[in-house]
Amino acid sequence: MNWTWFHKWGSPKWFYEMSGAWLRALAWAAAVLLLLGTVWGLAIAPQDYQQGNSFRIIYIHVPAAFLAQSCYLMLAVAGVIGLVWKMKLADVALQCAAPIGASMTFIALLTGAVWGKPTWGTWWVWDARLTSMLILLFLYFGVIALSQAISNRDSAAKACAVLSIVGVINLPIIKYSVEWWNTLHQPATFKITEKPAMPMEMWLPLLVMVLGFYCFFAAVLLMRMRLEVLKRESRTRWVRAEVEGRA
Amino acid sequence: MSFASFADFIAMGGHGPYVWLSYGISAVVLGLNVLLPVLAHRRYIADEARRIRREEAAQ
């Protein structure tokens, strides 16, 4: 097998040159999908026969919760790549993704609370799904705090990678929490093996929103990573040329 | 369209405050996720350009 594609990722300069075009494409895709999904979900999709219009919160709650978990998985994968292959870009990705993941977890928790009030009659219950999501938020805070507490870049990268990998144990707990324990939370909305439990006209806008959130995440991640690469490579000639070209 | 009028759309069948609060705060959080990196990028380029000019002037 040819591994040159993998070795390219070892070069911050190559990443910076390529990611500009990716960023533009992803930003456009995110803007179009999020706009379409929001209008579709808020105004066009029919209301739920039990929950009325409060169910429309699903169109941000579920995508944000998806992203919150996918992003943490990405942190762990980046952590493994960073520890095993000592790839600098993996640590950049890990550091830059953590705040975005934290904000997605915050959105999921907050919209969940606001949705819970009219649906369950309470903002918050200490049940398994909600508590494990709160732990996910604290794991993100842990990664962010750890990287800022250690001034040596390599030590910080290692510590954050290890914390990210250990924290992955929380992801199956979140996923199966609605099956293992009694909970107010409804079971999974997306199932790969079964037909969706929602009618198509409710489910399709949700799919659009999920795709939009993924594109949004990728675009914002690239924005942060490009800046971080510039900072870390500030002594090189190509960064200097880039700065002078832009200023 | 799921709503008969714009007023119905805003009211959301009595769930308006919950729906709009959720969408509003989420929009703010997503917006910050875009705005903060853009501002940080601009600030960094400006600071670095100033540093390079100062170094060149000192030589």
Image: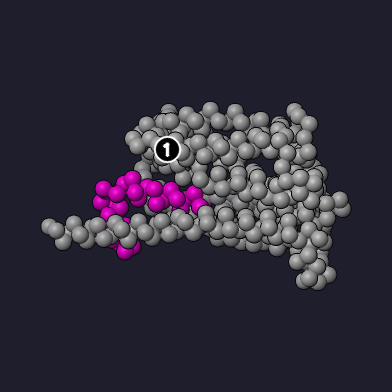
Which quadrant of the figure has residue A168? Answer: top right
Q: Residues within 10 Å of mark 1 (few under 14, many from 20)?
A: some
User: Does residue A238 show up magenta in the picture?
Assistant: yes
The image quadrant that residue B56 belongs to is bottom left
Q: Residue furthest left?
A: B59
Magenta stretch: dominant SS?
helix
Name the residue: 51% across, 33% down. A164
Residue nearest the viewer, comparing A39 with A57? A57
Q: Nearer the viewer, residue A97 or B27?
A: B27
Please tell me whether mark 1 sits on a helix, a strand or a loop: helix
Q: Is residue A212 magenta?
A: no
Specify whether A165 is left or right of B3.
left
Give the quarter of the figure containing the N terminus of chain B: bottom right
Identify the residue at image location x=64%, y=62%.
A35
Coordinates of residue A183 in the picture (x, y in percent):
77, 35
The residue where tag 1 is placed is A147
* The C terminus of chain B lies in quadrant: bottom left
The one of A30 and A228 positioned closer to us in this rendering:
A228
Residue A177, horizontal then vertical, whole percent: 71, 32
- Amino acid bearing label 1: Ser
Check the image and report above or below for A159 versus A217. Answer: above
Q: Which residues are magenta?
A: A219-247
Can you give x and y, in whole percent of width and height, for residue A24 in the image? 49, 59
